[in-house]
Amino acid sequence: MIQIRQLQKAYMTGATPLPVLRGVDLHIRPGEAVAIMGSSGSGKSTLLNIIGLLDSHDSGEYHLDGQEVRALSESAAARMRNRLLGFVFQSFHLLADRDAVENVALPLFYRGIARKERNTRAVAALQQVGLGDRLDHLPNQLSGGQKQRVAIARALIGEPRVLLADEPTGALDTTTSDEIMDLLLGLNADGLTLVVVTHEAEVAERCQRTIVLRDGQVVSRGAPVDASAP
């Protein structure tokens, strides 16, 4: 599903390039649950952004679902992102003046899907994450865990094959974090490929394997898991 070879990425600080990723190799199979860990500045969020087609790399290869993404135009990359990827963030990124259904339905609005259909699909997604009784609640009427469930439902509404989660439990207490990981790993058990950036060892330990970055390089990766194996 995700194949990365010798990925390099640097940002310019004035006239000086600042290397962030230094020859990263990575292979994530369909249906895996993989955690990416590393200290601040290790490159883990930059790597996730590149995997999510939100940022570009300078050199190396990145194949997503068999497609070399560097060859894609901006519009083709956006179509691939919408078709294959869902995103969950630590800060939820919910619209404060929209209820749960409207927040979840928003991606379908940008795809030009009719209001009735997108609302029907949003209700189904919220029921899937256990929020069937919070459909008309605004974000300020929801707990942190409920907000993250809304964000997960929004990520699922486009029926992605890969879910990318950037510190999805970082703003939550321990009990709520466990509940969110239960939900994410339940989705993974149903076949969704899961990639979680986290600084929490307890979260990483629940994934099938952990990739550790240090100074832009992979220092530990674990063996790839063949999700199709018995």
Image: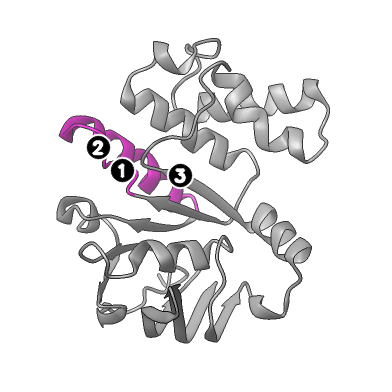
In primary-sequence order, the first of circles 3 and 1 is 3
Q: Position of residue 165 (x, y in %)?
A: 41, 50
Q: Which residues are magenta?
A: 167-191
Q: Is residue 179 above or below residue 66?
A: above
Residue under circle 1?
Answer: 181
- 80 relative to 3 in the view: left or right: right
Q: Nearer the viewer, residue 186 or 198?
A: 198
Q: CA distance from mark 3 to mark 1?
A: 12 Å
| Residue 141 shows in the view | yes
* Residue 162 lies within the magenta run: no
Residue drawn at x 44%, y 78% is 10
Residue 216, given in percent of the width and then of the height, sits at 31, 78
- Of tags 3 and 2, which is closer to the observer? 3
Instruction: Give the image quarter of residue 83.
Output: bottom right
Q: Is residue 223 left or right of residue 141?
A: left
Q: Residue at x 51, y 67 (%)?
A: 51
